[in-house]
Image (cartoon, rainbow, N blue to C red):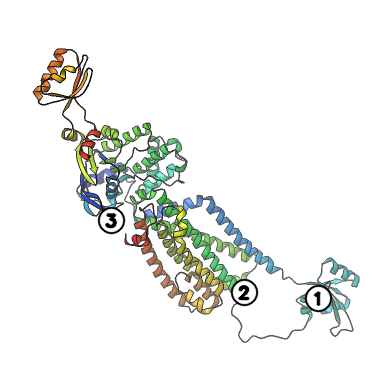
Amino acid sequence: MLELHDVTKRYGERLALDHVSFTVGDGRLTGFVGGNGAGKTTTMRIVLGVLASDGGTVTLDGEALTSADRRRFGYMPEERGLYPKMRVLEQTVYLARLHGWSAAAAHRNALELLERLGLGERTNDTIESLSLGNQQRAQIAAALVHRPEVLVLDEPFSGLDPMAVETVQGVLADAAASGAPVLFSSHQLDIVERLCDDLVIIAGGRIAAAGSGDALRTEHGSERWELLTSGDAGWLRQQPGIRVADFDGGWAVFEAETDAARQAALAEAVARGDVISFTREHTTLAQIFKEVVL
Amino acid sequence: MSLDTSTSRTVDRAGGERRTPSFVDNVTLIAGREITMRMRSKAFLISTGVLMLAVLASVLLGGILGSQSELPKVAVVGGATEVVAGNPALEAVPVADQDAAVQLLRDGDVEAIVAPAASEPLGIIVFGLESAPNSVVSALSVSPTVELLDPAAVDPMLAYFVAFGFGIVFLMSALTFGTTISQSVVEEKQTRVVEILLSTVSARALLTGKVIGNSVLAFGQILAIAVLAILGLMLTGQRVLLGGLGSSVVWFIVFFAIGFVMLAALFAASAALVSRAEDIGTVTTPVTMLVMIPYFLVIFFNDNPTVLAIMSYVPFSAPIGMPMRVFLGSAEWWEPFVSLAILLATAALAVVIGERIYRNSLLKTGARVPWGEALKG
């Protein structure tokens, strides 16, 4: 378990991180979301030891992180970059070896990973000759080739085509399934929502909300219900204890003052005709994000 | 996941193919990458080739020009043979008569004709074509014996060439590989690959690897030049020069190795301050000056013992100054050791300060990092 406790960072007068605390559980895909300048990159750099914090601790399984521990981290920085004149395979093998893999094993890992990322045909091309999308894939290979036990990825999906997004999702899910804590940031809230077990929302250098997706939904989600009938749902407006938020023909979104009022509304709908669906409205991450950040 | 299980997991998954790499492991890998990538660069291979050819050409040319001092040929007529035959500075070409001799002279086969002339005090007469054949005349003249009270230990012309040689080799290597290491540092900043590297290895390992990789290349180049020059000198039979150079060349190589590490650290630190290749020139100017000034000093002052003595102790000029003094024989046996100690101390200091600047500046992209900020961190 990767744990941040009261991590603080100042850039001159500006407080970039203000007592940031959250945990990334083993085998949990944890999404890290926040606006530009909220502190995501700074947090990740501190976790990786690339940047020094001004206070607080980062621990792995309760022990303070050492540089030897960090060797087992996989990191994809926000600022992408590889050696432009090195070949894809050569570069991936080089990074694996810097992490301590033997030459032969590094070679095998790299080939296997590049194949999986769809770069099997390009292993002997230089990085600079690759398309942007393929450069991103090479970057992902660079973060994963040493089989890290903790993953910290800053915007791993930006710049990827839909196919690559699919591949990378698979790779991340596998890493989590093998027990690794995985932390990644993204602006693409739909991907985060689909993929993540846990969420950390940061705003202005402070953690605005953190927890499992379900918990956050319960805490911040709306108490709204969605009804779809084959007839007209206009009668809902007259139903006692019901406030209609949105309405269109046979479809309506409403809030109920009490559970009894909701039950009564459903009974009425069934009595009036064909109910196609009746569900609790799905709260999107975007809605939660807006609620906790704004 | 406790730390224990995480360790055992590593062993399971990696099957002993992964270990925590030591500082030396990483430095070796980094230096190896620097060397491989440089050897793959066409610009590097071409410039090295050109430099090698230039050295070879100048050695061979020197040999050819030197060997042109072969004995002047003279056509000898009749009784003059006895006079010329015993003269070690002339090559006699006996001819039948005056007409045949004139023909040889006009054809340019000989430089002069020596003919018997009973009326002359020496008993011979020398004919030239357009101007007096001075070399022949002086060979036939009687010169008094000359003895020098204070002979110069080394021919000043030779001293100048040796100074020039040490100077140009040091200047070229330091500038070439200083630029290379600067580019390598900025490339990593500019392409942002440095952030991945720093999450894997320490800034110190990165800097050490770079300095060692480039030093090996510079040293290899110097060694190749030295071997080429020595081979050339041997082939053209210029052994005399070689013998006199011996110990000063050894000192030059020792001083060069340490001086280069010092300069490389300074180049790397300076380059780390900027993020774009275009800014390298400006930011490394102070270090470039430290390399150029000793070169000009040794060219202009290689006959000035005071300037040379100072140069031989100042760390930045010692790699040229001290070998020069060893060559001239003006240094006591202990002097190179003292100077070497000073150079070593300065190089160590340069590496420590350089590493600090390097580490503090690597992640600061964009505008040039001020020196103060880079030193403070």
Residue B226 percent coordinates (x, y): 55, 64
- Give the distance between the C-alpha atoms of the residues marked 1 and 3, in whole angstroms: 86 Å
* Figure check: B152 above or below B350: below
Describe residue B50's horizontal placement relative to residue A99 as left or right: right
Describe residue B156's horizontal placement relative to residue A253 as left or right: right
- Give the distance between the C-alpha atoms of the residues marked 1 and 2, in whole angstroms: 28 Å
* Rendered image: mark on residue A12: 3
Q: Residues within 10 Å of mark 2 (few under 14, many from 20)?
A: few
Q: Please tell me which residue lies in front, A120 or B278.
A: B278
Describe residue B3's horizontal placement relative to residue B324 as left or right: left
Specify the subunit that label 3 lies on.
Answer: A
Instruction: Residue at the far front: name it.
Output: A238
Residue B262 percent coordinates (x, y): 43, 64
* Figure check: B170 above or below B118: above
Q: Which residue is mark 1?
A: B132
- Give the distance between the C-alpha atoms of the residues marked 3 and 2, in whole angstroms: 61 Å
Q: Visible in this render: residue B301?
A: yes
Mark 1: amino acid: Ala
Describe residue A216's horizontal placement relative to residue B363 as left or right: left
Residue A173 percent coordinates (x, y): 29, 35
Disc 3, SS? loop
Mark 3: amino acid: Gly
Q: Which residue is mark 2?
A: B157
What residue is at 35 percent from the left and 60 percent from the top?
B374
The image quadrant that residue B358 belongs to is bottom left
The image quadrant that residue B205 belongs to is bottom left
The mark lying in front, picked from 3 and 2, is 3
